[in-house]
Amino acid sequence: MTHSAPPTPATEPAHHRKPKSGYKSRNWLHRFDNKRVPYLMISPFFLLFALFGLFPIVFNGIVAMRNWRLDDPALDGWAGFANFERLLHDEDFWNALVNTFGIFVLSTVPQLLIALMVANLLNRRLRANSFWRVGVLLPYVTPVVASTLVFAIIFARDNGMANWLLSLVGFGQDAPLDWRAYKWSSWIAIATMVNWKWIGYNALLYLSAMQSIPKDVYEAAAVDGAGPWRQLWRITVPMIQPVLIFTVVLSTIGGLQLFNEPMLFEENPAAASGGSDHQWQTIAQLIYKVGWKDLNLGYAAAMSWALFLIILIVAALNAVATNRLGGGRR
Amino acid sequence: MERFAKRGVALVAAGLAGTLALAGCSGESLEGGGDKAAQGQTTLTVNFWGDMGLDALKAAYEKDHPNVKIVLNSGEYNAQHEDLQKKLVAGTGAPDISAVDEGFMVQFRGQADKFVNLLDKGAASYEAKYLPWKWAQSKSADGASQIGLGTDVGGLAMCYRSDLFKKAGLPTERDAVSALWPTWDEFIATGTKYTKATGKKFVDSGTNLFNPVLAQQPVGFYDTSEQLQMEGGPKVAFDVSMKAIDAGISANLASFQPNWDQGFKKDQFAVLACPAWMLGHIQETAPDQKGKWDIAAIPGGGGNWGGSWWTIPKQGKNVDEAYKFVEWMIQPAQQIEVFKTVGNLPSQPALYKDPAVLDYKKEFMSNAPTGQIYAATAEALKPQYLGKKNGPTRVEVENVITRVQQGSLKSSAAWPEAVKAAEKAANS
């Protein structure tokens, strides 16, 4: 590759030029400069990643293979795959998996679709452009603890705002809906919190990608008689496809690790049980409960490894699916 | 010349700054009070939950011990215990002194090697002063190590709103109220009458009936060999709770949660099972209901619910200072002070005979003689063994009760679910 070749001596500053006797050492320095220094420059990230990213993952894998109970320090040693085997028969785990995927679908799909619409609107000529653009990011800036506490009040059984709205259209006037009592209602409540927080964030990502699409493509399409809806699906979506895949992968990871919202939706957050019948207990919550309430760290580590694998698989599947959806250009 | 002059100015300035710094230092050490400050200030962090009446104690102790600074750190009940557990595992970060409740004591005394053995510090001399079971509960299994000094015990009584009782046409005087409900069945019957008369709910939550009834049973969730015993005590308690929910007298509020606190203010219930430490909570949650609350006997007699110890994690740097403070806190004068401010009943029976306790009347609770009421239940109390998994098991069974209250589970089908949930917790 020509552009990564070492610079020619002519471009070097004059004082680097030395008599021929020093050429060899200079050459060494020069090669070091070109071959090693880039690695040195990017190494801090990888060192930090190894320390705070890779090491915990590997160590977690080791813990997952061991017995480690805080309330029974005498019980330690190699457990082999016993923790993973237990996982397969643990109905709590499967229940949490179903919950996680249910909430994930309820939050990710509307979230990305609405974000796309919002971005499309923001991409037009609007008055007070930056006001709207900054505005959609506000939910993202709000601390999740604060916003979730507000939502917990909205979805309260007695005197909750959601129930008040429902009563306006004639639902549940005598017996208000207990949002925490059922799977479907608790999932909707939690997905609403997630959607509210992330729609603006994704919309801005889409917007930035949309702005790089040349205007004449739209003009040509308009001349050919394509309406705004058709333009969105036939031009915009395929053209911002890399960003689409990025957001899908990102929200897959976020959605499957969902913790804060379900945790704070609980009446007693410290219980981490995800409702009286684990209606909305997510895997991340279950890991917390197994580790710090049941004090079974080995089993909790096995669960987090399983979650890690599930996320890898789902993220890959989603990326492939999104790629297909956008016409399979990549 | 000019350059030299500048340098001179800089030198003088540096010297001045140095002198000032020195003066500052010496000034500070003089302020601190001579020798003690030279030894350095000791900061003791104390972790607990709710209100344990420590604010006044802290001020008094700091006044007498100018070299000690005490930092009070109150948090949520479960979170504080879990935090302590994490810090013990991590080997660092634990507070100098940590309160531990009876629900978690079995878990922590199993890790006695991570706590200071108070017997080494001379705590053996206090053994005779404590209720024998209270002393034994915080001892390690081999008996060689004592990890906690008792603060309070629960005892049980029933708090009631005399103003709401009056509106419902029920007696309001505490002996007459006690006579209404010698048994839990009669208690539920009274509740039904109240609900019929007022259209309001009688008790706060089914779980707050389950817990005191369970505390009255000779055996709780686990026997001393750590075997789950659901058919004994838990079944009795569960049935009472189901019966109350079916009778429609429960407001179905999750206790210690925001809705529950709202329930106090909105008069959503008229009675509340009241261990001694609950008095502090009522006072804190509904300060304007002063004089509207009173205390009657609980159906079914004695029983213990709650009660804590002070422990000193070994990893602390100020272990000796911490022990001195704990030792001071459990002296009669301080125990009585705590009893008067928040209502926590001491765990040293000699104090139950002390006029300061015996004659004490709690103004907030319509001048109820809290000393007499709780001392009597505490002395009559047969302690229950709480297994290692008591905490998580209780949470699981409470969840089943909540499902019945939410209407997603029928009370007739609830018991097998409770057994299943408890077994899961026992094997977790």
Image: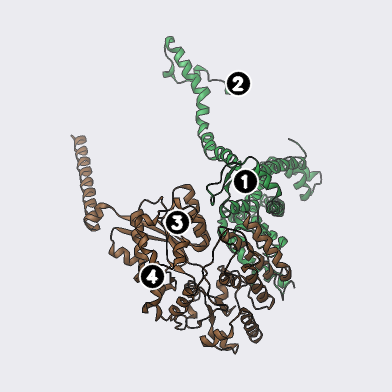
Q: Which chain does the numbered disc 4 sit on? A: B
What residue do we see at 22% from left, 48% from top? B22
Residue B199 horizontal/vertical position (percent):
65, 83
Question: In this rendering, is residue A175 above or below A149?
Answer: below
Q: Which chain does the numbered disc 1 sit on? A: A
Q: Which chain does the numbered disc 2 sit on? A: A
- In the drawing, does residue A161 fall left or right of residue B386? right
- In the drawing, does residue B54 fall left or right of residue B8? right
Q: What's the distance in space between the residues labelled 2 and 3, CA to CA? A: 78 Å
What's the amino acid at mark 4?
A: Gln
Question: Which tint is chain B?
Answer: brown
Using the rendered image of the protein, determine whether residue B265 is visible from the camera's viewpoint.
no
Residue B272 figure quarter: bottom right
Residue B80 horizontal/vertical position (percent):
49, 59
The residue at which mark 3 appears reads as B143
**Image mark for residue B216:** none
Question: Which tint is chain A?
Answer: green
The residue at which mark 2 appears reads as A2
Q: Are marks 2 and 4 on the same chain?
A: no
What residue do we see at 58% from left, 58% from top? B226
- In the drawing, does residue A184 fall left or right of residue B213? right
| Callout in the foreground (2, 3) | 3
Residue A5 figure quarter: top right
Q: What's the distance in space between the residues labelled 1 and 2, CA to CA? A: 46 Å
| Callout in the foreground (2, 4) | 4
Q: Assign the N terminus of chain A to one quadrant of the image.
A: top right
Q: Residue A135 or A47: which is nearer the viewer?
A: A47
Q: What's the distance in space between the residues labelled 4 and 3, CA to CA? A: 26 Å
| Callout in the foreground (4, 3) | 3
Q: Are marks 4 and 1 on the same chain?
A: no
The residue at which mark 1 appears reads as A304
